[in-house]
Image: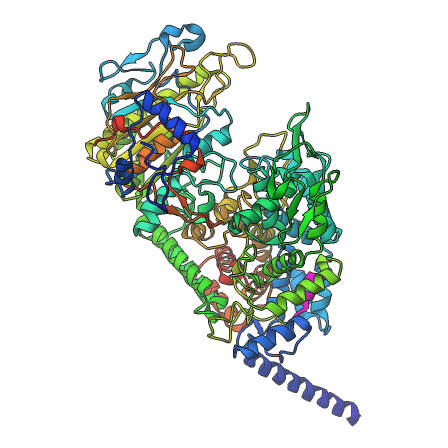
Amino acid sequence: MRLPNQKNALKSAWRLAGLILAVVARTRAATPFENPAALTPENKIDEIVFARLQHMHIAPAQLCSDPAFVRRVYLDVTGTLPTTTEAQRFILDKAPDKRRALIDRLLANDEFADYFAMKWADLLRIKAEFPINLWPNAAQAYHHWIHDAIRDNRPWNEVARDLLTANGSNFEKPPVNFYRAMQNRTPNGIAQTVALTFLGERADRWPSNDLANFSVFFANLGYKTTAEWKEEIVFFNPAATNAGALNGGPRKTIFPGGQRVTLPPDQDPRAVFAAWLVKDPQFARNLANRTWAWLLGRGIVQEPDDFRADNPPSNPELLAFLANDFAASGYDFKHLCRLILNSKTYQLAAISQSQSPDAAANFAFYPLRRLDAEVLIDAVDQITGAKEKYSSAIPEPYTFIPDNLRSIALPDGSITSGFLEMFGRPPRDTGMDSERNNRITAAQKLTLLNSSQMQKKIEASQMIAFQTSGNRAPADIATGMFLGILSRFPTAAETRTAQNYFDSGISRRQATVDLAWALMNSTEFLYRH
Amino acid sequence: MSAFYFDIEKQRPRISRREAIRRALFTASGLMLANHISFRALAAAPTARAKAVIQIWMWGGPSHLDIFDPKPEAGYDYCGPLKSPIATNVSGIRIGELLPLLAKQADKYSIIRSMTHGNNGHETASYLVQTGRQPGGRIVFPCVGSVVSLAKGYEAGYKGLIPPYVVLTEPQGRFDEAGFLGARYKPFSTGGDPSKIPFAVEGVVAPGITAQHQKDRRELLHHLDTLAQALPVDPQVTANTQAENSAYDMILGDGAKVFDLSQEKPELRDRYGKSKFGQSCLVARRLVERGIPYVTINYGGWDTHKNNFQAMQRQLPELDKGFATLLQDLSERGLLDSTIIWWGGEFGRTPKVQWEAPWNGGRGHYGKVFSAALAGGGFKGGQVIGASDARGEEVKDRPVYPVDLIGSIYAQMGISPTTKLPNPEGAPTFVMPQAADGIKSAGLLKEIMSA
């Protein structure tokens, strides 16, 4: 009979020790956002980044905590908040490789395709009306096409070739819309758009000869309308002599890399260019750098669409590694995302341990960024169960806006809402990265803190109804709200704060509404971290 | 004229072949008086006569024949029932019969009857009229309000609580107003309805939340803002805190008072008209009084494809009350001299009435010739610039292109045509187009600008 007792005593001792360890661990991790575990390289990215940080005497941040990770990776990969259950399950999961498993799961989600199609639609300027005049059904078809390419993880050399060489109707051959989604359809204007999209370069800064040579590839592009309303055919037009007598004749030119090429008379020069492009290292560098910037908030070359000799990468070895790996994988976009997401560099906390002005450019911490307009309103609506109303200046029936459409899944830049406009959704005029404006303004704060729009969403939400139902204790209400809104458990101090607010003589319902309001206006809610 | 067509780098005019031909033509017809000296003189920052602009934006395109360019002699097919224009307090100027109050204020504004750009699409025409630019380049240009909010707002040390570019009450949504300047230069749209009490300006006035409650929940927010506490020096956190402080200055401080129309005398509110438009005019005056440099009243309902005349009967008295009272009120307060009122839409409407179904007396889009009006801020009143032909179908005399009107507003506001705009693509870009841009122009509105 003593043995079991002894065993029990031993068990309790271990439990106590475990508890003490946990408490120690918790005090070492100063915030709910950090994890004090030792920082060991996970992959080649970390070896390169950490070596450079060490060389520059920049201390990296700690690893991010599990709650910070689950929220971050949902937002970065799917543009979507984890639900209460998803957050809770991940935080309590004991599996050592749970971060890797979550990354794999999220890359297979529908929202991954929605969210990255949104980014590509910004870049490709998918918009029905003014100044990009795709017209609604062509915009929808084009978005659908790029969305499926991302969902099916088509290799990007193929996707790029399709976009650059397509011929046919804007309704039936969606990638031809690449050449329609620009205001300036001269060979010169097209060349600038192609350089921005696929080389990450601003060709208006090139020497004018280089741009003229490049534009030769797009000089035989024809556009014609048909009897069908707003249909337009994009085609190879050998007769077009827009290029003029450059370099001794229209059939000779120079690639952006500097090699000379003679264009076969029977071949669409776009195909010659596309074949060169997808083998050029700058093609992989551009896509690797854009992907890095999408996930880490800052390019290795920054701005991500401003590659030029006097704007070098902050870590050339890192960019070279990512570009080579991306090319070697057969331009496998999910592979590239997986590589970056699994790195400890991506998983650093947002709390910098360094005062160095070079810390950010060398990825010593995960930088705070205000949520994208679309992601923010989707998050608000997910929590409150509200629905956003969209409108398009193009009247129905041409613009179809289904109910329950999330903002990240909007196909057409002409479909919008006051919230999206105010929070800096890109107008899709130029495809430049800087069009998206995530800088906070006083007007945005007025909307979030004090608009009837937000107040109504919170007050009418299922969450408030659920939390105030029955006779739940304030601490339980706080736990539910923290998990639902911030994807983590409250700290003891936070629970006390909530408790005090409930005890301040305010109605239970009002206290619950105010608590939701406070959490939804917190830095933690508004910013990726 | 053409003050803006010059090469910044070399500080002397640069004239393209096309421009040279165009100039020769205009000079021959006596419209052109540019020389190199006047170019230089105008390149220096002009003296600011105006401090603010109130833009009455007639969204949809108002009918020029029924408002400021009546053509009773053209007959029923052009005028419909509105065949008896009325005299104004300026001899020789007649305007539409449904505008008796504006007729009594005609000495305060000038009418441009020869606006033209030739485009009949809402989006493109809105862009043409409000940016003066042609679409088709790589970029989208900012509209006048965004440029003013840059040059006379943020870059001129504007520190007001309310953003320097306000739209009453909904944004236009036809193109990105701020263009390449970005979100900061977009208008602050008030939402709400100023004809209701209170005027619930979105985010500023929250009915049902007391000041004490505002303070209590803000304190709760600060206690629970754990990430901000962990990152006291992060630039994003600092920016967020600053924006929050500005927002609460509006919510709890004086900012909201500008929208409180109960501070106005009931008789004056009545004079403006109790419509959304009328009360918006009153709010616009209050905003200008407090130093906001650009206010747009986005006034819809003018896209009168069907039943044009019923719409005119219904809406023009509302326009008449609001606009006329605004002129009178600004004038009585001594504010008209420093406040430009710019009235107009993206185009006019087809002079020939479409009587057949389904239009039933409607008017279509018409960009070939249309009207605009300017008052105050150094613009002379009581003048008519240009003319349309007998049926209001063509410019007969003195074309005015959008860039001419916009350039004149900039000149009165003291914004130099060569003020640089931060174009993200890096090419030097200026407030006014240069010769190479190939924008049609027939010169600033010298006729109504004091020397």
Tell me, yes or no, if residue A407 can be seen here. no
Measured as percent of width and height from the top left, residue A195 is found at 60, 49
Residue bounds of the magenta highlight: A335-343
Residue at x-position 41% and y-position 38%: B143
Quadrant in the rendering for residue A268: top right
Looking at the image, residue B231 sits to the left or right of residue A248; the answer is: left
Asked if B205 appears above or below A83 in the picture, the reply is above
* Most foreground residue, B84 or A20: B84
What kind of secondary structure does the magenta stretch mostly adopt?
helix
Looking at the image, residue B114 sits to the left or right of residue B333; the answer is: right
Query: Dividing the image into 4 quarters, which one contains the C terminus of chain B?
Result: top left
Quadrant in the rendering for residue A39: bottom right
Residue sitting at the far front: A248
Measured as percent of width and height from the top left, residue A272 is found at 71, 46
* Most foreground residue, A109 or B442: B442
Asked if B339 appears above or below A378 in the picture, the reply is above
Query: Dividing the image into 4 quarters, which one contains the N terminus of chain B?
Result: top left
